[in-house]
Image (cartoon, rainbow, N blue to C red):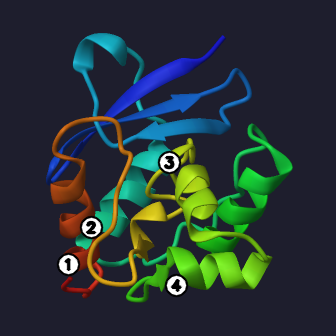
Amino acid sequence: MNYPCLYAAPFGNITLVFDAEHNLVELNLHGKPEYAPYPLPDVWQQKLDDYFAGRLKNFNHLISKKGTAFQQQVWQAIAEIPAGQVLTYQDIALKIGSHPRAVGGACGKNPLALVVPCHRVVAKQGLGGFSSGEGDALAIKRWLLRHEGIDI
């Protein structure tokens, strides 16, 4: 059984989903209180508080084991991007021997948005896309990048 929890971020609610062993299995940058009835574990409350206060730069969290080998390869490359830096879809594609569109597709399937920081992947010219689940996704991507000191 999974346990959805809610966190009130500066740009809106975030839903975090944990498994029975208290492992984070999903983070969605759009949260609906009616779908997240469980209390957020203290350790994650602190991590998110620290991130949004600027005290935590990188979550250093394992990538999801869900997904194809290719998706996991992309997610691992994304997880290695430090706060305050961005890579393009093409940068990651060259690093792993793929194509930018395929990298973008894998970014969109990342179940651990924010902690595996797909918001740090941008287009060659501009912001690029962001599949955080709702219509204001690009505004959230912009907010996260600005929070980390990047103005695109």
Q: Quadrant of residue 97?
A: bottom right
> Do tag 2 and tag 1 residues touch (Cβ < 8 Å)?
yes
Q: How many marks?
A: 4
Identify the residue shown where x is 43% and y is 78%: 57
Looking at the rendered structure, which numbered label has been put on residue 82? 4
Quadrant of the snapshot with the N terminus:
top right
Q: CA distance from mark 3 to mark 2?
A: 16 Å
> Which residue lies under the disc numbered 2?
144
Say above or below: 33 vs 71.
Answer: above
Earlier-in-chain disc, 4 versus 1: 4
Q: Which amino acid, by three-letter code, is at mark 4?
A: Pro
> Which residue lies under the disc numbered 1?
146
Q: Which amino acid, by three-letter code, is at mark 1?
A: Arg
Q: CA distance from mark 3 to mark 4?
A: 19 Å
Q: Is residue 34 left or right of residue 90?
A: left
Say above or below: 121 vs 4.
Answer: below
Which of the pair 30/127 is nearer the observer? Answer: 127
Q: Is residue 42 left or right of residue 69?
A: left
Identify the residue shown where x is 74% and y is 40%: 67
Q: Position of residue 5 (x, y in %)?
A: 41, 27
